[in-house]
Image (spheres, helix red, strand yellow):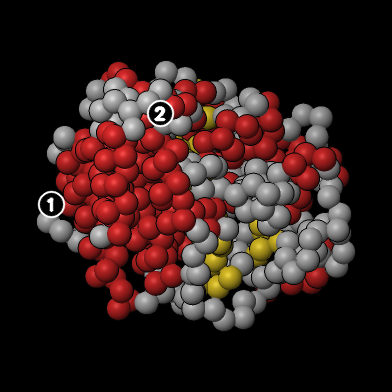
Amino acid sequence: MKHSIILTSLLLALHSYCTSALLHNPPRSVVSSLHQKRRHRPLTVDFTARAPSYHHHPTSPSKGIVTDELSATHHLWATHALLFSSWTDGVAPNPNVRSFLKYCLLRKMLGDELSRHETELTSSAEFSPCCGPDVDALNNVEYVDTLIHRGQRLLGKFGLTSNEDEFNEWSKEVLGYLCREAKEDSLDLRFLYIPTAMYALNPQSSNTPGKQRQRARADGKKRRDQISNLLNQLFHGVDAAESAKINVCAITLDLDDGSLKQPVGFRDPGFIPEDDKIALSEWNPHLIYVEGGNTFWLQHCIEKGNYSTLIKEACTGQNGSVYCGKSAGAIVAGKSMETATWKGWDDPSVVPGRESFDQWIGCPGFGFVSEESFFPHYSSEWSDLIKEKTASGPLSETTTFLHEEDVCCVVGELRERFVLGSNFDAESC
C-alpha cells in the first residue's frame, strides 16, 4: 500500500511538472531510488549452521596475493553459482540443491524481465515526457521487484522442508507471470554446456587422438543430456501445467576451438547463437555449465581463446548467468587454480610449454567467490596433504574443500555462500 501511494504520487507529480528536466533525470532513476532499499539492502540469511569439517574460513584477509591479476579479482562475486565435485553425488540427489538451482534460474529470468521493463519505462518518459512514464511498465517493475525480494527471503529456508510449499507457490507465480509477459505457452531456458576439460587427450591411452575425441564428445553429450533432464524435472510435480512451461535449449561450446555443436530444443533455428562469443554474450544464457576433466587443459583453452573476461562478464553483475562448475569447473571458478596441482590427478603435460606443476603455481581463476579457492573430491586420505599445502601462503585461510556430495551455493548479490552436503543441511563455506 505504501508503495502504491508513492507511485501514484510520482505519476501525479510527473503529469503536473512536465518540464524538460525530466529528460535529464529519467524516471528509471526515480523508480530505482524507490526500490533501492528493497532490491539492494542486505538480507540476513539464517542458514542452519554446524561446524564444517575441513572448511577453511577467511577469518582475515589473505596476506599473500600471488599475482597482480589475482589481486584484481578479489572483490568479484558470481551472481549465482553452484560449485561441486560430482553432479550425480552432489546435485542430482539433493532436494535442497535442486531447489536452489531452480531458484537461481527463475531469479535470472526475473532479472531479464526487470531489465526489459526498466528500459520500457525509461523510453516511455523520454519519448513522451509530458505524459510521464508508461503506467503498465511502472507496475511491472514494481511487481517483478516484489517477486525478486520474496525469492531472496526464501533463500534462508531451503533447509526447512516445512517451507517447501512456500517455495513452490513462489515458483508457480513467477513462471505464470513470465509466460503471460512472453505471450507464449512455454519459456526457453538457454543452457550453454562447456565440456572442454574432458576433451583433453590422454598421452597414456592406447586409442588414437581421433578415437579419444570421438569418445569424449559422446560422453559429453550423455552428461549434457543428464543435466537437461534434471532441468526439465525441476519444473515437474508442482503443478500439472508447470512442466510444460520450460523448454530447454541446449548447445555445446568447446573452448579449444570455439566450436558450437549439438544444438537441441531450438524451436526456431534463427535463435541458435552464431559463434562462441555471441553464445557467451548476446545469447544471454540462463545457465553456463563447465564440466570436469583436466583442469590444466581447461585453463589453457580459457587463456588461449581469451574467454576469461567473457565468462566473468556473463556470470557477474546484477543479473548474470547461473554458473555451474563441476570439479575442474569449480577449481577455475576460484581465486586461484593452484589447488589443481595438489593431488597430482590432472596431467599438465597436455599443455605444451607448461608440462610441470610448478608452471601453474599462482595461476588465477575467475574469482567468483571473492577470496575463495576450491579443492574438489576431498576425503580424509588428503588430510595430511591439505595440512601441508595450507600451512602457510595465500591459500592457507581461503580454500574450501568439497566432498563428493558437497555443493557450494553462491549468492553474489547477498555476498553469501554456503555448502549443502549429504545431510541436506547448510554449512557456511
Residue 245, relative to residue 168: is it above or below? above
Position in image of residue 172 (x %, y %): 21, 56
* Residue 26 relative to residue 383: left or right: left
Q: How many numbered marks, from 0 up?
A: 2
Residue 211, relative to residue 370: is it above or below? above
First along the sequence among labels 2 and 1: 2
> In which quarter of the view is residue 295 placed?
top right
* Residue 204 relative to residue 154: left or right: right
Task: Note whether residue 390 is visible.
Answer: yes
Residue 101, relative to residue 296: is it above or below? below
* Residue 82 relative to residue 226: left or right: right
- For this orientation, the residue located farthest to the left is 240
Front one among 104 and 16: 16
Position in image of residue 6 (x %, y %): 32, 51
Question: Residue type at mark 2?
Answer: Leu
Q: Nearer the viewer, mark 2 or mark 1?
A: 2
Q: Quadrant of the N terminus?
A: bottom left
* CA–CA distance in space, label 2 to label 1: 44 Å
Residue underneath mark 1 = 241
Front one among 300 and 409: 409
Classed neighbour count for the residue bearing mark 2: other residues with Cα under 10 Å, few (<14), some (14–19), many (≥20): some
- Residue at 49% from the left image edge and 74% from the top image edge: 47
- For this orientation, the residue located farthest to the bottom is 50
Position in image of residue 384 (x %, y %): 79, 72
Using the image, tell me which numbered label, if any, was put on residue 22. 2
